[in-house]
Every structure is written in structure tokens, then in C-alpha cells.
Amino acid sequence: MLDSESQEEELAVQINSLVDFLEERSEIAKQLRSSCRVDIVCSFSSEAGQGGIVLSHTLLKRLGQENIDLKIDLFPPGKEKGEPEEETGD
């Protein structure tokens, strides 16, 4: 698991590192895929409430060639993963 609190390390860089890791161990990765599903799950939040990420076509192609699904969970600003929803009092 990669965990980064740094704004400087973009999500695409982390995903690219994971794909590099799997490509360098292609035989082991192939054995894993024969018996289980390989996914990359990422969390993304923007302090301003808006924002996004661009994943290059090259990186997306590499994910596809490795049969890796990518899931990106979006969280509103100030909400950490796993925090309960706030009650509105309506």
C-alpha cells in the first residue's frame, strides 16, 4: 500500500509506480491474476471541493495490458475516509 499526504506526489505518479512494480515482476503478477483479481484503489479529496486528476493514455494502456482495474474514491473536502456522514437536523 502506498500512502501519501504530500500534495507534491500526484496520484498518477503513485499509480505509475505500482504498474512499474507489477511489470518488473510480470511472472508473479501473472500467477496472481490467475487466482485473484488485481485492483488499484485510490482515494482523492480536494480542499476546495473541486479538482481532478489526469491519467495519461499511456498509463491507462499499461493498466489495461496488466488487466488492472482502477477505482478512485472521491471524498468531499474535510471528510476523511471512514468518517460518518454529518446529520443535517432536518
Image (spheres, rainbow, N blue to C red):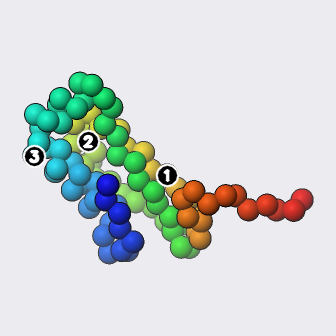
Q: Residue at x 22, y 32 (%)?
A: 32
Q: Residue at x 53, y 73 (%)?
A: 47
User: What residue is shown with label 2?
Assistant: 63
**In the rendering, at what x and y percent does residue 6 appear?**
36, 74
**Residue 13 or residue 51, whichever sits in front:** 13
Q: Please, what is the three-letter code of the amino acid marked with disc 1? A: Asp
Q: Which mark is residue 4?
A: none
Residue with the mark numbered 3? 24
Residue found at the very far top of the displayed protein: 34
Q: Quadrant of the C terminus?
A: bottom right
Front one among 28 and 50: 28
Position of residue 53 relative to residue 67, above or below, is: below
Q: Is residue 4 visible?
A: yes
Classify mark 2: helix, strand or loop: helix
Q: Earlier in the sequence, mark 1 or mark 2?
A: 2
- Marks 1/2: CA distance? 18 Å
Q: Give percent across and percent down for residue 56.
A: 28, 53
Number of numbered discs visible in the structure rendering:
3
- Occupied quadrant, residue 16: bottom left
| Amino acid type for the residue under numbered disc 3 | Glu
| In-image side of 59 versus 47 (left or right) | left
